[in-house]
Amino acid sequence: MAEATKKAKAPAKPKKAAAKTETKTTAAKTSIHQVEKVVTHEQIEQLARQYWAERGWQDGYAEQDWLRAEQQLRQKAS
């Protein structure tokens, strides 16, 4: 009868987890910086309300206040 021989296992391949983690960390840092530059709806609303208050709560300029606030915040973000 033929004897069964065990084959030796192939050597383990080196893990590349460290390189992947580093790439993910770098990508996360980049996204955090990109998020900081984004102007949110809430930020625009808050500044527009401030402009409205500065005018003594006078109606009729909501769109102008909004556009002014949006422009100011976008300039600061860039």
Image (cartoon, helix red, strand yellow):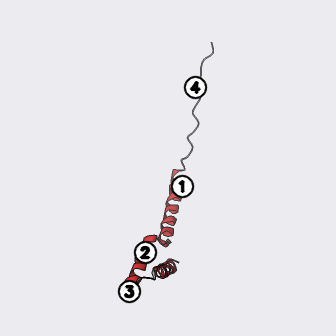
Q: Amino acid at mark 1?
A: Ala
Q: Amino acid at mark 3?
A: Glu
Q: Residue beneath label 3, please?
A: 54
Q: Nearer the viewer, residue 23 or 61?
A: 61
Residue drawn at 53 percent across, 47 percent down: 15
Q: CA distance from mark 2 to mark 3?
A: 14 Å
Residue drawn at 47 percent across, 78 percent down: 66
Disc number for residue 45? 2
- Where's residue 48, x and y in %? 43, 79
Q: Earlier in the sequence, mark 2 or mark 1?
A: 1
Q: Earlier in the sequence, mark 3 or mark 4?
A: 4
Residue sitting at the far top: 1
Q: Earlier in the sequence, mark 2 or mark 3?
A: 2
Residue drawn at 49 percent across, 62 percent down: 28
Q: How many residues crowd around disc 4 within 10 Å: few (fewer than 14), some, or many (20 or more)?
A: few
The quarter of the picture where residue 55 lies is bottom left
Q: CA distance from mark 3 to mark 4?
A: 85 Å
- Where's residue 39, x and y in %? 48, 72
